[in-house]
Amino acid sequence: MDGGAAHGYGVPIAVDSPPILGRAPELERLGALLGGARNGRGGALLIRGEPGIGKSTILEEAVRTAHGLRVVRADGFEAESAMPYAALQRLGTPFARHVGDLPPRQSAALRIAAGLDRGDPPDRYLVGLGMLSLVAAAGEVEPVALVVDDAHHLDAESLEVLAFLARRLQAERVVLLLAARADVLDPAAVAGVATLELGGLEPIDAVRLLNRSSDEPIDPYLAMRIAEETGGNPLALLDLAHDFTADELTASSLAESPSPIGHRLEAHYLDRLRELPSRTRTWLLVAAAESTGDAGVIDAAARGMGLPADAASPAERAGLVAVRDTITFRHPLVRIAAYHGMPTADRRRVHEALGELMLERGRHDLAAWHAAEATPGPDPAVAERMERAADVAGERGGMVSRARLLARAAELTPPGAARDARLLSAAEAAAGAGAVQLAGELLASADPSRLDPVGRGRALMLGVGLALFVADAEGILTASATSLRAAELFHGIVPELEQRALIGAFEVLLTAEWAARDVTLPELGRRLSEGALVADGPRAVALRALGAHILLPYDEAVPIMREAVDMLVSADDADLLEFGNFGVALTMGLWDERTCVELLERTAAAAGRAGALRVLDTTLWLLSLLELLHGGPFASGRYIAQVRELRHAMGYDAEQVVNASYLAWSGAPAEVVEAIAEQSLALGFGGVWTLAMTGLGIREIADGRYRDAFHRFEPMIARDFLQVTYQQLPEYVEAGVRSGHPDRVHDAAARLRFFAAESGTPWIRGVAERCTALLSDDADAEPHYVASIEHLTLATVRADLGRAHLLYGEWLRRMKRRSEAREQLRAAIAVFTQIEAPAFAARAARELAATGEHVLRHEVGAPEVDALTPQEDAVARMAAQGHTNAEIGGTLFISANTVDYHLRKVFRKLGVTSRKQLAERLPTV
């Protein structure tokens, strides 16, 4: 707990004084938050500052004035810092009666996280959504204030869920207040949470506090010097005033080299502790080592160590601790001094006593923690207990806690293979929780030479994952080759891991694409095909299809690829979450955009239901890329907005979400797009570079700069890269024909016709007919234009349909058939306006004007939902599709209350009064 917990920092308050001296603005902000919770405007605030600055004092005052709110507290304790969801369980217990009212997945996640049920470890974001729904339900009964002090001592899982909660509270009758030390709390853990940085008191307030607290008058100049030296730290001012005379204060403040206030206070408390009897210092050591402050546990341990019943009394009289149901130290520095000021042997003896007591009470996790603290060096038996505790943490979904417990188990393990295996498992757990820095440190600590082949393969795969996460260019460029090495290590030992590594090798190759090193497509294709033979099952089907995609002629590969796509179509949620991404390559290779979108949307829904926000993030990002082909920039922009909102919920910097291809389509300056592309390539993301260059080439075609587009696409086509190149072929044909190079694009058009004959989807048939029309003589072109439009009308690729209308309209105008041309060009403008492709819309408008028809500006404007925010747009579309508020909330990771709040705003903005009217009003793209 922070110091100065009593109101007014523990000094008498004048009638006309604010509740806490010098903190009126902070209290006003807290009051507004509490008032908002009473009125259905939920919110959160993290109060952060140095030790003794008054965080707890302000928190206590907020609790005291939280009239009409149910206050629930769950402070952080160091002993629980490696016990997953420990604080969350204490915070949620008072609301247990509402758990049965939650969606089944959410209630199950909360019960597994709390250790009440067994089951698959839940994703922490699903636990977060469950907690959001739980407190929202409680808030419907009465407004709720959740209060957490010493948040820097929370277990990682509880802190992450509470940070998620803080970012999502919007329209609930719930407020969350957190307080933590700024020098200990990891800023990344609370990214995106509204924060009050608490500084020292203003000099005039510091002087007033010092004078009120001192038994003797203090010279004004001296008081100002002391205020400056302490930085206005209230606890420092109080303790200096209480424990030093005016002369001593003078000597201290005039010293040439004043020590930092934290060190000074710690030394001061240590001196005070040395004045206490030995039995009291030992009792304080027990209280400091126990850390949760449980008076019953501390008393039992003290009795077990032979301490008298009144051992705590001298410390209580000295004001160093408050002894009630919970033992509270005056300040964290008192606890630090009480613990570290005692000999190491005494500390170990106390932890041993506490460990035995916890074992008797059935708290095996705490018993293992104390046993580890009592151990002077490697101890295989204690390491085994820590590993068991880590396994229990993992079963509850506490991956960071599992990582830390395994890391401690490794420290207690003698050097050798067992130690390195535990370090590797710890690194994998940390990576699974997104603790990338911790994972990297743990992986670097393990000696690969002491791992068995499977362990070395796991280490390689973990290194690939970390490289992608931190954008390590070298690691990304060699990721596919590294994955193949891992597969070799798994070969003949663990077929499942071998096949997973091989599928991973293909997927990471799509990240680096043509820039990848140490591997070739044929080499990868052969290895994938061989991997399909090591075991039957879905992975074998996937590997066989991917190998065929790379190695076989298209007509031979199509049926094998379709078999894998059919498998995905019939897959359940679990298989979709594992296999969904490679399906993009196969469906796009088959020109089956409809199935591709359906699979990705199902994967996104499955990820939302499972709380797998990282999978959801990746899937939404893929949808944003695909929609540039499927629905155009408008639909792509909707998904990009969802990615931003999702990353905000996860605590990432949402402003860094940049889709360079989308920017190119939408009219961003070419130099900006190229700069983003080159930066991405420098980081190893060759696929991002290709998408950006493709977007720029399409923009050049829209602007009529065909020569530039032709020269942009030609080298990319020469670097043939599976389905990526397939999508570039139509652009290459149009740019080649319009720039005067039809002879150089005949092979590309023939290839598209071959694809159409073998795949036969409406998309590829329409695109192939369009390219054939471009290359045909005027006498032969029209049937192909008409066929293109007919096929693309059956497909869902709005952008390609618009371009087919545009090209046909341009051809009709050249044929002097102006009336028919206008019909096609109007159809093109309607499509381009709806999908927000301004460059193509402008090109169609210019052609239409050339026919003699005037084009109104609003005809090439944007769709009519500009007034909606991204989250309102997402809520509105799901509501229009018939989803309930609970279903929408589960998908978007907000509460049903917030869904209702957004829907009311949507109805007002769009002037509708029902979901049926909403469905009629929204664009269909």
Image (spheres, rainbow, N blue to C red):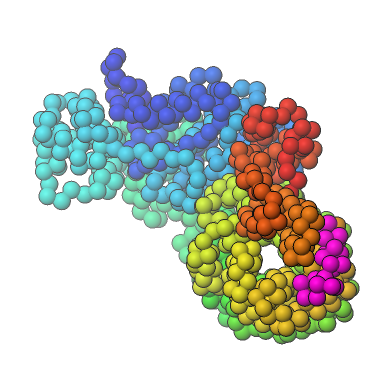
Q: Nearer the viewer, residue 129 or 776?
A: 776
Please say whether residue 573 is visible from this viewpoint. yes
Vertical position of residue 520 compared to residue 303: above or below: below
Residue 884 screen position, x and y as percent: 76, 35
Which residue is pictured at 70% across the width and 75% down the height? 737
Q: In the image shown, does 868 or 522 lie closer to the viewer?
A: 868
Magenta span: predominant SS is helix
Can residue 774 be found in the magenta stretch?
A: yes
Residue 48: x and y, percent? Answer: 40, 41
**Magenta run includes residue 182:** no
> Is 517 displayed left or right of 678 in the figure?
right
> Where residue 253 appears, x then y in whole percent?
14, 41
Residue 844 placement: quadrant: bottom right
Magenta residues span: 773-793
Q: Residue at x 61, y 84 (%)?
A: 518
Locate the N terminus by quadrant: top left
